[in-house]
Amino acid sequence: MIARFLAGLLLLAFAAPAPEMRYFLYQRPIQLPVGAAGQACVVVDPTIFAHAAPGLADLRLYNAGAAETPYALQTSETVTGSPQQIALLNPGRSNGKTVFDAEMPPGNFTDLSLAVSGHDFIATVTVSGSQSEGAESTHIGAFTLFDLSSQKLGRSTILHLPNSDFRFLHFAVAGPLPPASFTGLTVSQRPVISPEYVTVAQSTRVTPDDRNSVVSFTLPPHVPVDRVVFVPGAQPPAFSRDVEVQVAPIAPPPANAAVEPDVTPSLQPVTSYGNLLRLHRVQNGLRIDEERLTIDSPYAGFEGPTQWTVTVENGDDAPIQLASVRLEMRKRTLCFDAAAGAVYTLDYGDPALAPPRYDYASLFVPRLGAVEASYGAEQANPAYQPRPDERPFTEKHPALLWIALGLVVALLGLVALRSVKLTTKASS
């Protein structure tokens, strides 16, 4: 009896509201080619995040405005193996060059990152490969390593190899780097799939601030940002600049609409850092071609709108002529099985809902040639009704839950006390 009572309390406490079309604030029609059927996919528009629940938990797809249609939500990801640390073999000198070998893991790879100590150097690394140790090797290419920190032009020790699958690599370094300068290398398996991105916001307005260049964005709630992309102009032709990206929550607008919204003082901004590099030149007879024009964005899980401030630190150098700065998110695709002639709408704007759990999503396999769908304009749900207070009884009246639990504990205590008295009486 007591166990059933407690189970009933738990069911009341954790009952989840069910989706109903009348409780969604917004909807967007899904547009399919005439006569299309089978697996169909549509890219999730960044604007949907602003009116949907966090993580798109309340996203629902309906057929003909009635039947809920299962879907799978896919996020574009980089598919690679984990980076592996590789020890260097047989370090030494040969013909005036530093040489060493490395045994590579099975599979394809491209970029190698060499661990190099030292500063203010420029060197050429010639790389060859073979499938077995000591076998005749194949020339892969020559690559430039550099550290031009004293010229404020950064450092690069990454070798951009073509797609390779050699089991053994041989390195010959021409330049001022002895064998002890090299302590290892890191390799990542070649990406099978490269991520795709969607632009969330873009700005061409760059504001000078002391010795910095500042670009600002205001984003609505829940919109994810995965990276910041910089498009520099022609000047300066070479640069290495540190960048700060700060994300701060914005307070709700004050009663007086003429007053500008301010950053919420109770929540701390989130900040991340990166470096921009562009270097295309011949130095000491060696060609250098290196660019890094994207940086990862900080995670900002704020519930409301946010202010993004991107600061490029120019120091005493001429500012970078930025043509634009973009905030981008990884591409998210919603896929479902479309019936011929059916009409679908995407509904959202009911924060009471938990994320759906469909067998369709668990068993989903993308198909080549899936139908490409698109959206109509977002519109208010004409049948919208405010959701009634569906909170569990125990959540509406939390004191009653504690009273009930107290009564159960007291009852158990009385039962235990009575059992002790009966046992004592029987033994005497």
Image (cartoon, rainbow, N blue to C red):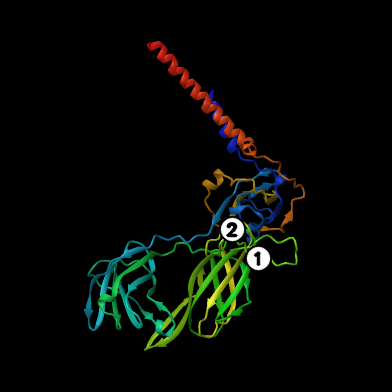
Image quadrant in which you'd find residue 267: bottom right
Marks 2 and 1, the one that precedes in the sequence: 1
In this rendering, would 363 be left or right of 284?
Answer: right
* Nearest the eye: 210 or 283: 210
Residue located farthest toward the bottom when viewing the structure as drawn: 284
Task: Tell me the element at label 1.
Answer: loop
Determine crowd level at label 2: few under 14, some 14-19, many 20+ residues with C-alpha closer than 10 A.
some
Image quadrant in which you'd find residue 281: bottom left
What residue is rendered at 36% in x and 83% in y?
A: 120
Q: Please tell me the numbered disc located at residue 302.
A: 2
Residue position marked by numbered label 1 in the rendering: 262
Q: Considering only vertical position in the picture, is 412 above or below 370?
A: above
Residue located farthest toward the right when viewing the structure as drawn: 382
Q: Where is residue 94 in the image (x, y as percent from the top left)?
A: 22, 80
Q: Where is residue 325 in the image (x, y as percent from the top left)?
A: 58, 73
In this rendering, would 419 be left or right of 36?
Answer: left
Q: Considering only vertical position in the picture, is 406 above or below 362?
A: above
